[in-house]
Image (cartoon, helix red, strand yellow):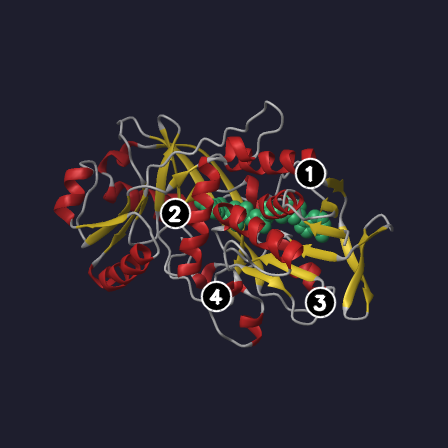
Amino acid sequence: MRQKVVVIGGGAIGSAIACLTQGTPGFSGEITVIERDPRYTRASSALSASSIRQQFSSAINIRMSAFGIEFLRRAGELLAVGNERPAVGLTEQGYLFLASDSGIDILEENHRLQRANGADVVLLDPAQLRERFPWLATGSVAMGSLGLSGEGWFDGYSLLQGLRRKARALGVTYLAAEACGFERDGARIGAVRLADGSSVACDVVVNAAGPWAREPAAWLGIELPVRARRRCVFVVSCPVRIEDAPLVIDPSGVWCRPEGRDRFICGISPDAADDPDDLALEVDHALFENIVWPTLAARVPAFEALRLTGAWAGYYEFNTFDQNGIVGFHPQVQNLIFANGFSGHGLQQSPAVGRGVAELIVHGGYRTLDLSPLAFERIAAQRALIERNVV
Ligand SMILES: Cc1cc2nc3c(=O)[nH]c(=O)nc-3n(C[C@H](O)[C@H](O)[C@H](O)COP(=O)(O)OP(=O)(O)OC[C@H]3O[C@@H](n4cnc5c(N)ncnc54)[C@H](O)[C@@H]3O)c2cc1C
């Protein structure tokens, strides 16, 4: 059967879904991606820290990142269009989660789960940490968890553009337009209405609207617990060379990682009590001065001499219910698929989400990777899938 698929949002998630669905053997039909900001000026996928880790606290997230790293390692080949192979610049230098005394139990529990799911991680005591990373001050650190492979960072914008280019080469249409409503057909959506008054008929609709995903859900009277929460990234240069640093996450939540040869990027998520929805995309410089810099200077003494060279702000598409993706069909609106709420780990999960949603569309169920723990039903049932490692 030929299917008309409409994807609202052409960021990494929407583009991965379009690309992998169109490329799935057995798919027959046409895919339209509706994207109102084709230069991605506000899209999370273009404003991300673009890092990938296996160190999660839930099995589903670990398995999705295992899929993600394999995809990134082969992105040049998988996303090639003719002779052009996108370079996503994958740098596998690991993540280092640091824990103080009070965090040891959780670190060890996560470690067991990560190992059981195939993650290449090791626990290090303070002496081992100092030996491996002589630039690190380990005062107040009781243990660290280091990813030995399968973790690091990449060029998120190149991944986004590579997915989009490949999707178009396979026959996907990108419409530069704003979706603003649905036309209902009983328990189904018959068409997506556009702001210019036209509409696009559909057999399946995917909500991939990132931080704005609650809006398409609200057109159907569905409350989707996804909100736009601002996160700031600071770019710094450091006069002292620090070789082969991983992405370090301090027990306070402050993180930093190398960016190119002589720069680092860093940041912290604000306290839950100070994290309103929809803040303007302006950089909160006080966060750097008052929290990020002093914390980093204490953890890496060479950072006392760092210099701020740039900064940007973007939105997490924050799932206020349990900080995990919401993926799959809606239980009542029969042809609506969600791919939302990834809460700061959506770029690394975009290949797995693309694969899973493609299988839902083509086969009506998951084949490669079972994403059913992320189903929408858990929200109505109040069955939270808590992810403790939200950075
Ligand atoms: C500062 C920061 C750091 C991050 N760090 C990481 C990280 O290290 N690793 C990681 O994996 N993830 C990270 N993330 C999260 C990751 O970037 C996101 O989870 C991911 O990019 C979400 O992709 P998306 O396609 O759902 O959303 P987006 O990229 O925002 O795309 C959604 C698109 O939908 C479009 N849209 C919305 N509504 C409509 C409409 N009505 N009509 C038409 N178009 C519409 C928007 O214009 C937008 O382009 C970070 C995010 C931020 C902001």
Query: Label 2 near label 1: C-beta < 8 Å?
Result: no
- Label 2: element kind: loop
Give the distance between the C-alpha atoms of the residues marked 3 and 4, in whole angstroms. Answer: 24 Å
Q: Amino acid at mark 4?
A: Asp
Disc on the earlier residue, 4 or 2: 2
Q: Which of label 1 and label 3 is nearer to you?
A: 3
Report the disc number at residue 334.
Answer: 3
Report the disc number at residue 322.
Answer: 4
- Is the C-beta of the residue carrying label 2 under 8 Å from the nearest atom of ligand 1? yes
Residue at which label 2 appears: 53
Give the distance between the C-alpha atoms of the residues marked 3 and 2, in whole angstroms. Answer: 34 Å
Q: Amino acid at mark 1?
A: Pro
Left or right, residue 24 beside residue 335: left
x and y, in percent, of residue 47 in the image: 53, 41
Q: Residue at x 32, y 56 (%)?
A: 114
Q: Which of label 4 and label 2 is nearer to you?
A: 2
Q: Amino acid at mark 3?
A: Gln
Report the disc number at residue 1.
Answer: none
- Is the C-beta of the residue carrying label 3 under 8 Å from the nearest atom of ligand 1? no
